[in-house]
Amino acid sequence: MIFESTDTYISTDELSMAVDAAVKLERPLLIKGEPGTGKTLLAEEVASTLGLELIQWHIKSQTKALQGLYEYDAVSRLRDSQLGDERVADIRNYIKRGKLWDAFASDERVVLLIDEIDKADIEFPNDLLQELDRMEFFVYELNQTVVAKQRPIVIITSNNEKELPDAFLRRCFFHYINFPDRETMQQIVEVHFPEIKQDLVREAMEIFFDVRKVPGLKKKPSTSELIDWLKLLMADDIPDEILTNRDPSKAIPPLYGALVKNEQDVHLLERLAFMNRRDSRG
Amino acid sequence: MLINFFLTLRKYKVPVTIRELLDLIDAMRHRVVYSSIDDFYLLSRTCMCKDEKHYDKFDRAFGAYFKGLEDLHGLLESLIPDEWLRREFERALTPEELEKIQSLGGLEKLIEAFQKAREEEEQRAREGEEGEEGEEGDGDRPGQRGPGGPGRGKKKKARKVWDQRQYKNLDDSVELGTRNIKMALRRLRKFARTGREEELDMDNTIRSTAHNGGMLDIKMRPERKNTVKVLLFLDIGGSMDAHVKVCEELFSATRTEFKHMESFYFHNFIYESVWKDNRRRMNERLPTWGILNKYARDYKVVFVGDATMAPYEITHSGGSVEHWNEEPGATWMERFTEAYDKMVWINPTPQETWEYSTSVGMTQELVDGRMYPLTIRGLEEGMNHLSK
């Protein structure tokens, strides 16, 4: 497969397949899914994996389909004509290229992201049917057809705020990003914040034992606060049976491996456990 | 890290996404909080809750999650192997003490004896605690202090923050008042203004062109157009009497929110005619066909009724309780679904009771499942559907 999980993005097999198909068959890929499931990020990742440039078109409620192709700035031209500006003679000076034009005009293949297409007016997708299908459009002012040099990889995202027209859907490949399961989420967190847990644990203990002086600190945590904190950081590693049985003495292979990284940390943890036990003996 | 916490929140229907989880972890990475569950509570609520109506659900989820964690007293000890502790312990001892231990039968035995004593003590402490329930527990009080005890009282105090559930009444599944209804309806109006056109602002253009010494200076302004058109059908009389007040509130709210709104009354179900003025319902009836033909497809149709009746009132000709209807209500309803793209049925009876009424189920089927309870969330979902 041409697109798989990267150092910064976790892709499922289904998603990789969808991207694969869309790239090879040169069809737009419509991505739906709950907010925060990485729809927009996908385009960036595809672009960087394939080593292509990414052109992003973020849709707003007032965005018109035509703006993606080009805009003719008639008002500027009118004003310029009053001032006797030379540029007036050539209409090209007043045609502003849109993102789609940019993508079509590129010599290299590009990835074009049309982000949150459902934000726009209901007619918006319909207005882009031909353009996305044939990858060409006609500029009336210039009497010229713009044809894509390379068919761009088009990725379209939707938050499902509006239903999209059938004619549009027929022309796209579709993938719904499921809400990730537990394992995938763990990977996602790991990708974004590697070793965050160990870092937090170590720092909490260092502060507790005054190994590290942190300026502006209100107070040192108490033993019980620190232990609660460790529990919070650790919670995902505690097997379910223990949480339900409430009997940690029955437990468990020691979990310190998940908590600490090096010898020094181990020593701090030892001291903490010792203090805790001593305290609780009163 | 925190994934179970996150999943617990979702289980309690707090709408959280991965983005927010990553934000929270990022905040922890920047040491916004450290080693304090109280601070963590505040931080996580800030990161995860984007609407005060979810505070209550959040508090409940947080409480449930940390109940499990706090009860794990011996966790830390089970985290690390026993011999480590022993090593640390021995390090703190003088050679003489070590010798003494050896003479008492070795460390193993000593620990065993100690553990037994400790269990007994713990038992005592538990009993003591039960007796003093309701007081602000202070773990440092000598008599109550057992293994794992210190700080316990403090934790209890902290947990109160989320156990108080002071945001209870902001939950959106509760019944609503006029203001709330307006807020919910606003969703529909908001979408009405999307995709607006710009239009030429004549006055402003003339003024600023004059200012400009005759040079054209064109001013544009967004077109003001509330394009949402609504047909409202209200069930009146009979079983609806109990819901009159809330329907009035809904009605008064819709009046001010929509410019193009036509409202009609019906009794129990929609048949060949409706009426506009409830006082003259018998002599001034409007044929339903007329409405279907007059109002275009882009009108959004809202029915308000309890849909509680005998099933034959929907399925049979002549089923109506007031008059002879040539065609069954279901046929009329199908005509509505054909004629209009967007239609919802808002039901003032509690959603939990719907499944016990056959006619509600039938109505739900007729409106393609677009039946919503008359609560803030129900209205919001309904409006959301209408505005899609």
Image: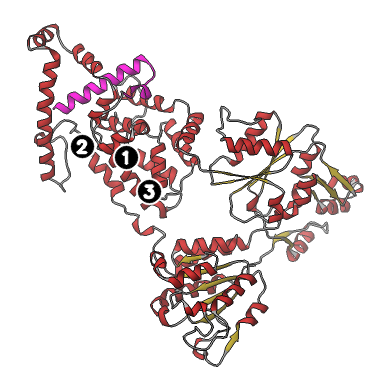
Eye-nearest disc, 2 or 1: 2
Task: Please identify the residue farthest to the left as the structure is shown.
Answer: B104
In the rendered structure, which amino acid carries the disc numbered 3? Phe
The residues colored magenta run A254-282
Residue at screen point 42% across, 59% down = B172
The chain carrying label 3 is: B
Per the rendering, the mark at residue B152 is 2
Depth check: give the residue in front, A219 or A116: A116
Q: Quadrant of residue B146?
A: top left
Q: Amino acid at mark 2?
A: Arg
Alpha-carbon distance for marks 3 and 2? 23 Å
Query: Looking at the image, can residue B76 be seen?
Result: yes
The image position of residue A63, as x and y in percent, is: 69, 52
Main SS of residues in magenta: helix
Which chain does the residue under circle 1 lie in? B
Q: Image quadrant for the N terminus of chain B?
A: top left
Image position of B245 (left or right of A80)? left
Residue B339 vs residue A267: left or right?
Answer: right
Marks 2 and 1: CB-CB under 8 Å? no
Q: Which label number is shown at residue B58?
A: 3
Locate residue B361, reporting x and y percent: 46, 68
With A61 as the anchor, is B80 left or right in this view? left
Reading the image, the residue beneath label 1 is B38
Residue B328, quarter of the rendered image: bottom right
Pinpoint residue B153: horizontal percent, then vertical percent. Answer: 20, 39
Residue at point 50%, 77% (across, down) = B314
Q: Judge whether A249 appears above or below B300 on screen.
A: above
Same chain, marks 2 and 1?
yes
Real-space Cα distance between discs 2 and 1?
A: 14 Å
What residue type is disc 1 on? Asp
How many numbered callouts?
Answer: 3
